[in-house]
Amino acid sequence: MHFFAVPMNDDILKVHGSIFFLLKKYVDNNFPDGTWDALNTAAGTSGNYYTTESYPLAEIGAIVSAASAATGIPVNDLKESFGIYLVPDLFQLYSNYLRPGWSTYDVLLHTENVMHGAVRKLNSTATPPVLNVTPLYNNILIIDYYSKRRMGALAVGIIKGIAAFYNEADEAIVIAKSDPDDERVQLRVEFKNK
């Protein structure tokens, strides 16, 4: 949930270039050839993003909005789908921080301390979203997600992608208890067979 994590300058929210790289990869793998260029033309963006740079959040928003207009898929559904798609790349990048024997529940429970801690360690200027994870009973997690980037739908997708990674997609039910476009989003994750 941290790829939108970059420092804020002059009240402009920024997104790391790697997320644009992964968005292009997502578009190239899920839509016809030439879609990336067409989306950037429609969005008024360059389409040329470097993984060593950061770019305004508005640019990724414009690209996703253009994709929604072109496909008829709602913006939040696209963000969620993109979140699901990101997980294998995230887990490859941060594999050293995942413990053997962990499940979706464990990854979510430890994301703020372990995964976001790794993000901050690897990039001292990173500002990942804040996740306060509260276990309820032994099969429910309440996740309070806070980010000025307002990417709650992406977070829902990443959670679903984690569950798919651990072959638990049918066992983990993710519900946004508040508007995923808010700065603060409460997510409930219930595990059916835990």
Image: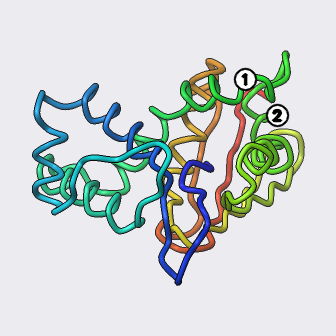
At label 1, the amino acid type is Ser
Name which quarter of the figure residue 85 lies in.
Answer: top left
Which mark identifies residue 44?
A: none
Q: Is label 1 or label 2 in front? A: 1
Q: Is mark 2 on a helix, strand or loop?
A: helix
Give coordinates of residue 169: x percent, y percent: 57, 27
Which quadrant, please, contains the C terminus? top right
Residue sitting at 80 percent across and 60 percent down? 132
Judge by depth and name the residue closer to the eye, 116 or 188.
116
Q: In this view, does 90 lie to the left or right of 107?
A: left
Q: Is mark 1 on a helix, strand or loop?
A: helix
Count of marks, rendered view: 2
Q: Is residue 189 left or right of residue 87?
A: right
| N-terminal label among 1 and 2 | 1
Give coordinates of residue 155: x percent, y percent: 56, 51
Which mark identifies residue 95?
A: 1
The residue singled out by tag 2 in the image is 106
Does 48 appear above or below 127? above
Measured in 3D between alpha carbons, the distance from the residue under mark 1 to the one under mark 2, in whole angstroms, is 14 Å
Q: In this view, does 161 lie to the left or right of 25?
A: right
At label 2, the amino acid type is Asp
Residue sitting at 81 percent across and 39 percent down? 139
Name which quarter of the figure residue 56 lies in.
Answer: bottom left
Give coordinates of residue 189: x percent, y percent: 68, 46
Residue sitting at 14 percent across and 46 percent down? 71
